[in-house]
Amino acid sequence: MALHMLTGAGSGIGAALAARLQARGDDLILLARSDARATELRERFPGAQTVVADLAAPGDLAAALAAQALPARLDSLLHVAGVVDLGPVAELPVAKWTSQLDVNLVAPAELTRLLLPALRAARGQVLFVNSGAGLRAAPEWSAYAASKHGLKALAESLRAEEAPHGVRVSSVYPGRTATAMQERVHEQEGRAYEPADFIDPASVVTSILTVLDLPRDAQIPDLTIRPGV
């Protein structure tokens, strides 16, 4: 059985991915931002291990992980968690920039750094769930898109650095997906939200599993997913 560490398992793509991995018999370590969220995740995914650390405070991740039991070998690190706050550059305050950069970029970089020894030991893989905004930036998406463009750069550098250690690195770029985050985006855009208009999270999960399960003679560095309509 493979062992995966996963962020963002509380909802959306992360929750769907955790459910699929567990259903096929894989073992999970789920990152939770608080003890209360950790309890919720253990109840939702019986048998999963939880680690409490807040991605909104990347500078504290090293101390948080050092105080908890972590594996010596890790088959995959799956970065799914993210936050989004829209607004024009002329109006977006510094706090909105820093919060998105911290959660969407700096925390994944730091979490990866801390877990690289375990990933190298297993010749495992790192997968970043990026976004269409990581490939292009629309009006009022500057901060979020900047964090996701940065995540793309992180993945590309990491892939080259870790190839000698046998660690695969991939990015998945979903288009708009029917999640709680998408509902929040629509609220910020002032538009009605209809989940059926967007990608089902299960479809994104299928693409992620395709990347993870690819035989070791190959890799999928980048995979873009778009709504079918």
Image (cartoon, helix red, strand yellow):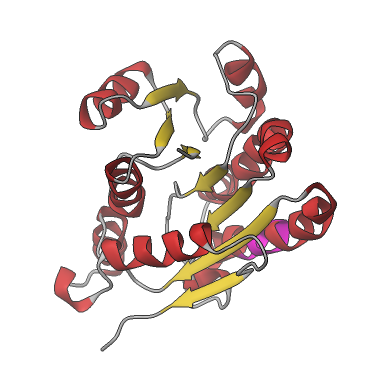
Position of 103 relative to 86 (above/below): above
Position of 104 relative to 207 (above/below): above
Give the residue displayed 52% in from the left and 48% down from the top.
Answer: 79
Give the residue displayed 36% in from the left and 48% down from the top.
Answer: 14
Q: Residue 76 is drawn in which quadrant?
A: top right
Give the residue displayed 15% in from the left and 74% down from the top.
Answer: 196
Quarter of the image for the C terminus: give it. Answer: bottom left
Residue 86 visible in image:
no
Give the residue displayed 80% in from the left and 56% down from the top.
Answer: 163
Residue 206 visible in image:
yes
Furthest residue in direction top, as rendered: 67
Is 8 inside the magenta-drawn segment?
no
Position of 162 relative to 141 (above/below): above
Q: Residue 115 is drawn in which quadrant?
A: top right
Residue 86 percent across, percent down from the top left: 42, 62
Q: Main secondary structure of the magenta part?
A: helix
Residue 61 percent across, percent down from the top left: 61, 25
Residue 149 percent across, percent down from the top left: 63, 65
Residue 7 percent across, percent down from the top left: 45, 40
Range shown magenta: 149-154
